[in-house]
Structures are given as structure tokens and as C-alpha cells.
């Protein structure tokens, strides 16, 4: 177990240095070193964000386009400065996952004034050329459903909610929210509201909020002092879930087989932790995977769809309208085959 968690943590730490330029194919920006497309994201140490940006970059490279990734380290001022630098570089497309979607409108307009197309992912800023998003509230409800599904399987003989303990013996679950943006708030609200439908669960909202691994570990340490009888933790995203997993796996007086962590976002590295939970070498039991939208009536994986939309903007087209809405799918251990 220690080897798995240490290797995964090392991956996250290394991710903070990620600012990669892809070079590929003659006769293009990739061959000349010119940056064609900027990919501005909050934090590449987030497993999902790290996986998505690098995979999209690789797809672009194979087609001969140069994508440069800019990691804002969750600093909104730094992200705006990065966008301004890309405007000065005269890139053709800027893909933006806003740290703070409430303060990027002006810099997006400045990019558009220079003829740069702006694609926003994860939120609606109101001024982008194209948007990719999901129903965050519904996603939060689905995360809660994952937790409820596991709790019923683990703590009842018949899988029925009424078989859970009642009264003072209610099963306790902890929620670590994040409400920094409207999208984060909607997802967190979805988690809490769905859990609240089950009156035999005692839902504890952690005092702190985060989407960052190290902060999640600190929040768990503080919350655990008064809530060490909890059986599950639900978090806004996978990065926070990794922090919770690290903390719980370090505790010696916990029956790991009867503890679960549930969240949103997926990556190959997070799947490793999910698979490890089959032997209780982690407590990450399931996550909600953003599975990508439908294009021309057919589902397309998120990373492929993202590159299709970016390239369409690069080519000066608006073939897919102004927005695409991703679906979500449950991801479990055993390579995500749907086995809880």
C-alpha cells in the first residue's frame, strides 16, 4: 500500500512542474516551435486535469499542432497574466479552465479583440466563443449515489436504506465541499442534497473546503478528531480524495474494508488507486468520470472531443455551435468495468 500511495503522491508533486511544449510534424507550428494553442488550467497536479491536458496535447502533436500548457497553481492573478502572455504571442486559440470564472471576462474579450478564439471548459463565463461543461449539480448527486450504493452493500444484508441503523446509531459520512465557483458550489450542493434524502445517514460538513490534496489531508485531520466513527468521505474532486485516502490509510485503528472515499473526476493514476481498493490497499471506492459529449449523435471520449472542438476553432469554424455538454459515467475498481 505504501508503495502505491507514495508513487501516486510523487506523480502529483512532479505535476507541479508541468509546463510542457509539444513538438511534432514538419510544416506546422509544432515543427517551428511556434505555439499554436494555449491550454490554461488551474492546477496540473489535479489528476484529472493533468491527464486531460497532456492527452489532448499528445493528440494535437500527432496532428502537427503545438499546444503549450500553462499551470496557474490555483492563482487567478497568475492565470490572467498567462493569458495575457499568450495574447502577446498571438496564439490562434486559448483553452481556458478558469481558476476564478468571475474575473476572466475582460482578458477573454481582449483575446477575442485580437482575433483569438477562446474555448472555456468547466464553466460558463458568458463571453467565450465555445464552452464545454457538465450539469454540475447532477454530477454531485451521482457522486452521492456512488457513496450510498457502497454503504448499502457494505452495511446491510439486503441493500435497502431502511436496513441502515436509525437514531443515534446512524452511519456518519463526511463531505468536503468546494464552493469557490458557481460550478463547484453546484456540484457540492448536489452531493449534500442527495445524501440528505437518506434520513439514516448522519451527514457532517467539514469545516474547511478544498480541491487540493494537501489541504484535504489537513481538513481530514481536523475533522477526524470529532468524527472518527465516520464510514465514508465524499469530496468535490479526485485531488481532494487523494488527500483523504492518504490520511485514512495512515490511521491504524480503522477497518479499511469498511471505509470508502467517493468523488468526481477520473485519471489513469486515480484508477490505480481504485483498483488497489479491491484489496483494501486504498479506500477510494468509486468516482464519477466525465465521459465526453455526443458529436453528430455518437458519444466521443472527453479527450478526443476536446481536441476536435479545439481544432475546429483553430480552423476558424463553429461546426458544433457554441457549447457542448459532457456526460458522466461511474468508474469503479477493476479497470472501471462497473464492478463496485
Image (cartoon, rainbow, N blue to C red):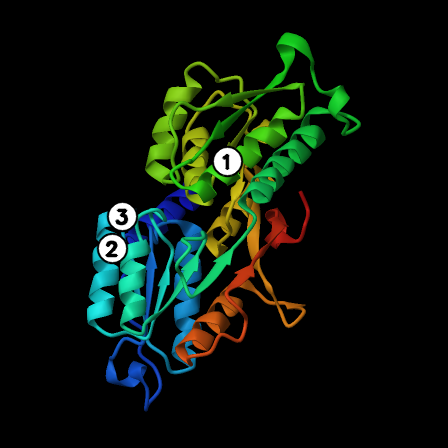
Q: Secondary structure at mark 1?
A: helix
Nearer the observer, disc 1 or disc 2?
A: 2
Q: Residue at x 56, y 34 (%)?
A: 191
User: What numbered label is drawn on residue 76?
Assistant: 3
Expressed as whole percent of the image width and height from the top left, the position of residue 82 reads 23, 59
Seen in the image, is 201 located left or right of residue 227?
right
Question: What residue is shown with label 2?
Answer: 80
Question: Dots 1 and 3: beta carbons under 8 Å?
Answer: no
Q: Secondary structure at mark 2?
A: helix
Q: Residue at x 31, y 62 (%)?
A: 109
Q: CA distance from mark 1 to mark 2?
A: 26 Å
Seen in the image, is 7 located left or right of residue 283?
left
Q: For mark 3, does the 10 Å Cα neighbourhood hold few (<14), some (14 to 19), or many (20 or more) residues?
A: some
Q: Residue furthest bottom?
A: 27
Q: Nearer the viewer, residue 313 or 218?
A: 313
User: What numbered label is drawn on residue 188?
Assistant: 1
Q: Secondary structure at mark 3?
A: helix
Q: Quadrant of residue 314?
A: bottom left
Q: CA distance from mark 3 to mark 2?
A: 6 Å
Answer with mark 1 or mark 2, whichever residue precedes in sequence. 2
Q: For mark 2, does the 10 Å Cα neighbourhood hold few (<14), some (14 to 19), or many (20 or more) residues?
A: many
Expressed as whole percent of the image width and height from the top left, the position of residue 29 reads 30, 82
Answer with mark 1 or mark 3, whichever residue precedes in sequence. 3
Q: For mark 1, does the 10 Å Cα neighbourhood hold few (<14), some (14 to 19), or many (20 or more) residues?
A: many
Q: Nearer the viewer, residue 251 or 220?
A: 220
Amino acid at each position: 500500500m505504501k508503495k502505491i500511495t507514495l508513487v501516486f503522491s510523487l506523480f502529483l508533486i512532479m505535476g507541479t512542474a508541468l509546463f510542457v511544449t509539444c513538438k511534432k510534424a514538419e510544416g506546422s507550428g509544432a515543427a517551428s516551435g511556434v505555439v499554436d494553442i494555449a491550454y490554461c488550467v488551474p492546477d496540473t497536479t489535479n489528476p484529472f486535469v493533468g491527464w486531460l491536458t497532456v492527452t489532448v496535447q499528445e493528440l494535437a502533436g500527432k496532428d502537427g499542432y503545438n499546444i503549450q500548457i500553462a499551470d496557474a497553481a490555483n492563482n487567478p492573478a497568475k492565470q490572467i497574466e498567462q493569458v495575457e502572455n499568450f495574447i502577446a504571442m498571438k496564439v490562434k486559440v486559448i483553452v481556458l479552465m478558469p481558476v476564478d470564472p468571475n474575473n476572466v471576462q475582460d482578458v477573454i474579450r481582449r483575446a477575442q479583440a485580437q482575433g483569438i478564439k477562446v474555448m472555456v471548459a468547466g464553466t460558463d463565463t458568458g463571453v467565450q466563443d465555445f464552452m464545454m461543461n457538465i450539469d454540475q449539480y447532477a454530477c454531485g448527486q451521482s457522486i452521492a449515489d456512488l457513496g450510498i450504493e457502497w454503504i448499502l452493500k457494505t452495511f446491510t444484508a439486503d441493500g435497502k436504506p431502511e436496513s441502515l441503523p436509525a437514531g443515534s446509531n446512524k452511519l456518519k459520512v463526511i463531505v468536503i465541499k468546494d464552493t469557490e465557483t458557481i460550478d463547484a458550489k453546484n456540484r457540492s450542493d448536489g452531493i449534500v442534497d442527495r445524501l440528505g434524502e437518506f434520513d439514516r445517514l448522519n451527514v457532517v460538513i467539514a469545516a474547511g473546503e478544498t480541491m487540493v490534496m494537501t489541504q484535504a489531508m489537513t481538513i481530514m485531520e481536523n475533522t477526524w478528531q470529532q468524527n472518527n466513527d465516520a464510514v465514508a468521505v465524499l469530496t468535490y474532486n479526485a485531488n481532494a480524495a487523494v488527500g483523504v485516502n492518504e490520511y485514512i490509510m495512515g490511521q491504524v485503528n480503522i477497518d479499511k474494508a469498511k471505509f470508502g472515499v467517493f468523488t468526481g473526476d477520473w485519471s489513469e493514476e486515480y484508477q490505480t488507486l481504485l483498483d488497489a481498493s479491491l484489496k483494501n490497499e486504498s479506500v477510494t471506492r468509486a468516482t464519477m468520470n466525465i465521459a465526453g459529449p455526443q458529436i453528430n449523435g455518437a458519444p466521443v471520449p472527453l479527450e478526443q472531443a476536446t481536441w476536435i472542438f479545439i481544432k475546429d476553432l483553430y480552423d476558424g469554424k463553429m461546426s458544433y455551435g457554441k457549447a457542448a455538454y459532457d456526460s458522466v459515467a461511474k468508474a469503479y475498481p477493476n479497470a472501471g468495468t462497473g464492478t463496485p
